[in-house]
Image (cartoon, grey):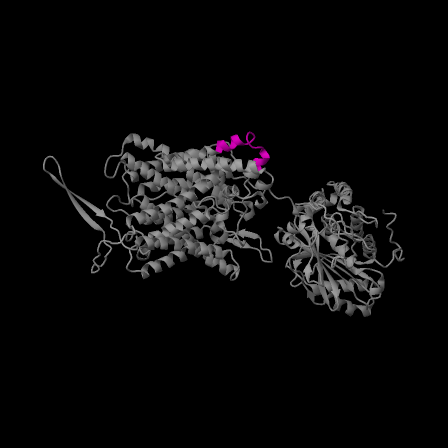
Amino acid sequence: MEAVLNFEGDKDLSYEDNDSSLASPFTLSPVGQTGSYDLEQGRQKEEEEEEQEEQPAESYALSIIPRSVDAAWNTNTNATTRGDAQAYVELNELLGNKWQETGRWAGYEESYNPITGAWGPSHVSYLTFKSLIQLRKVMSTGAVLLDVDESGLSGIAERIVNELLDRKEIRPSDREALLKALLQKRSQTEGPSTGTSGIDMIEMVHTFSVTKQRDTADSVEASIVLSGVVDSLQKPVVAFMRLRDAVVMDGILEANMPVRFIFALVGPSQSGINFHEGGRAMATLLADWVFSLEAYLAQNEKELTNAIADFMDCSIVIPPTEIQSLAMLQPIVNFQKRILRERLRPADTRIALGQKAKGPEKPREDPLARTGYPFGGLVKDIKRRYKHYVSDYTDALNPQVLSAVIFIYFAALSPAITFGGLLADKTEHMMGVSELMISTCLQGIIFSLFAAQPVLIIGFTGPLMVFEEAFFEFCKSQGVEYIVGRIWVGMWLIIIVLIVVAVEASFLVRFISRFTQEIFSILISLIFIYETFAKLMKIFKTHPLVLNYEHLNATLDDPFHPVYEVQNVTDEHGNITHHHSVRERAYPNTALLSMCLMFGCFFIAYFFRQFKNGIFLPGPIRRMIGDFGVPIAIFFMIAVDISIEDAYTQKLVVPQGLTVSNTSARGWFINPLGEKKHFPIWLMFACFVPAVLVFILIFLESQITTLIVSKPERKMLKGSGFHLDLLLIVALGGASSIFGVPWLSAATVRSVTHVNALTVMTKGPKPEVEKVLEQRISGMLVAALVGISILMEPILKMIPMTALFGIFLYMGITSLSGIQLWDRMLLLIVPKKYHPSDPYATRVQTSRMHLFTVIQVVCLGILWAVKMSKASLALPFILILTIPLRMLLTGRLFTVLEMKCLDADDAKVVLDEEPGMDVYDESPFP
């Protein structure tokens, strides 16, 4: 080929000026029909074709255009990309006195039809051999500028014109005319591609879009191709420029993105060059991975023209023969695959040079790696994190930290009030809002001071709520003091966590796969939903809808006062005992109003969540309103409840000041030997069992939360410490048991929200994570504000309990989003043609996917049965058994590939900047 393609002379090419008609191999007529396309007009309007009997084309279509959109990036070859960016190209043609965008490339090509004003479907680019030869010829004499430092189109145009003038490619009198032409205004034609009649563009119209590929790519660098007629020039001229740093230039492209290459091909109309096809040829070259790499690494003009020759070596020429059907193109596809496999060898030294441009990254230290000596992981955590201790305070001197504190305060206060109210209801006010708020305050401040990952927010969570209820019911059934039993459970917790940290057992979190996480997540969500409706039904039983109700005394300050009853009991010796009891009588409209408050609070909170991901208002304002959806919903329900004075609703019980929830049963210091009666010694040792169970819950939630927060995509530089944080959380909870306050764990939703609020994004059209403000001040301030909120007792007492039930319903339902198990459960009743394109649905047989789902549902049913039984305290132990079950399934019932698709940890980092998603999609637990 090199002997044929010799361009040393200035002779005209031995081709006729008129373009020959040639059919595109990838935008042909349906199978069984014939037709041809003119290269100038074929992409704008199809010629009339002779109708024939339709024949199925799918078998050949799918082999010509791949189903996977990744094929657009030529991933079926061994071509090496630059690694830091993908190529996007726009072709602008000079039409009259403006540059009109007529084509765009992201692997595949889309052409703009100025007649219909619409974009055509994506297709593989097809070029004339003549256009490639002409392009290489003009490139051999054109201006090539490499590593230019310019940031605007005017400066780029000046450099191009001056270079052409220095090379004597243009006359001095042409300078102003050419500069004016290059700086003409631009008309962008952004819009979706449209389908065509006949075959469905071989299915690719529905699966690939250049704009979608461009906008969803992690990193993109653009190229601009300018091609058109400038009759004032004496001959065609060409300029190729590579910028040293890719820069964003406003108004140049459809979407603002950094530009790396600029190419211009202009000349008189009678030059014998088809500027449209020449521009398309260069755009196709720049959209090609290998040529883009060659152009990025080229040191001189020779290497650039050699890259064009390499592209031509791997191109296929179709003779001017009529193609009868798509089946005739199948051998061409197979032939092309062989060429692509040999196109670029990995041994190419220039590729190695390109890879070294970014430099080898230092391997990240694995915080879960075991050292082999006692407390080795803890020591590594302290060394890794405490060297940044001073910067943890200096980095907090940022206005974004203050805004994060305000936001996270409400995000932490809402669940503290909600869980506190339900906890008081479940434990007969042995613990409630005041204990939970004070525990959150004190433990949160201490944790933020000494933690290895201070951006974690610790608080009360759903799994701990389930355990507290189960442990209270167990103690009540055994006739032992619940609040005293918690002290001994706490003491065992400290011993257990010391042993776990000493043997560096935090690495076990690696074995907790999605299989176990999602079963537990749905269980907690179902418990929340069930408890909500169970409480509502209890209200309807207490306040039934009847015709006549007991008369109320409206003259009293509180007409809804409880009824105190005294019952005299005489024993066999004649002694009389007075038993005092409180009877809760039925009130009219209470049940209906409670139901309205519950559903109203749920729907308002859910609406604001949907509003946050909607299209109304600017993004930051919309997200701010959506993030405060829960407090807004609660305040709305307070207003509704206050406005209806003649109906009774149960309110949140909050003690005045810093007093405990039940002053008659306990104080702030709990006697380990018993409050009202002696605590059995054997039970002190037996508390080891519930301690193991609650430790499992704290371990699961805290370590998984740390994994999510510490993902490399978040670019957190100071590191994390699984062993140190686990020791702090569990030891603080165990020691606080003596004060009768709840245990806490790392709260997933609140922690992820906190990190997102502290994330600094880069500027530009596609913001990326720049860094996270890793500091300790925001966590301490949030914890302190939650503790101070206990003084808001007059306001907290106005919150209807049923409004809090609505928040629990909200947490239960929203927590189901993003859980693959829930999605697969819904797929059990969804036809296969509507299944998503995720690997678990496409790479695994439907029957096998359903079998895996059924196994998880059976496990979920067993856990639910245990939870509802008297053995509910053993729930964490039964949950842990799903880990070895998952291991047994791998390689026996399911292949390794099937398990990778069904049980892969593919959760991505979710930021508030991403529309349509929020932290609930990333968090495994409510």
Q: Which quadrant would residue 269 be assigned to in this image?
A: bottom right
Camera-side residue: 91 or 800? 800
Percent x, y of residue 442: 37, 48
Q: On the picture, is 426 further left or further right than 381?
A: left
Percent x, y of residue 82: 69, 48
Percent x, y of residue 327: 76, 44
- Prevailing secondary structure class for the magenta stretch in the rendered image: helix
Percent x, y of residue 539: 31, 49
Q: Is residue 692 above or below residue 400?
A: above
How many marks the image carries: the answer is 0
Camera-side residue: 895 or 772? 895
Q: On the picture, is 339 further left or further right than 841?
A: right
Q: On the picture, is 879 further left or further right than 474?
A: right
Q: Is residue 24 one of those drawn in magenta?
A: no
Q: Is residue 678 above or below residue 177?
A: above
Residue farthest along the left direction in this orientation:
574
Res. 791 visible in picture: no
Q: What residue range appears in magenta? A: 883-900
Res. 751 visible in picture: yes
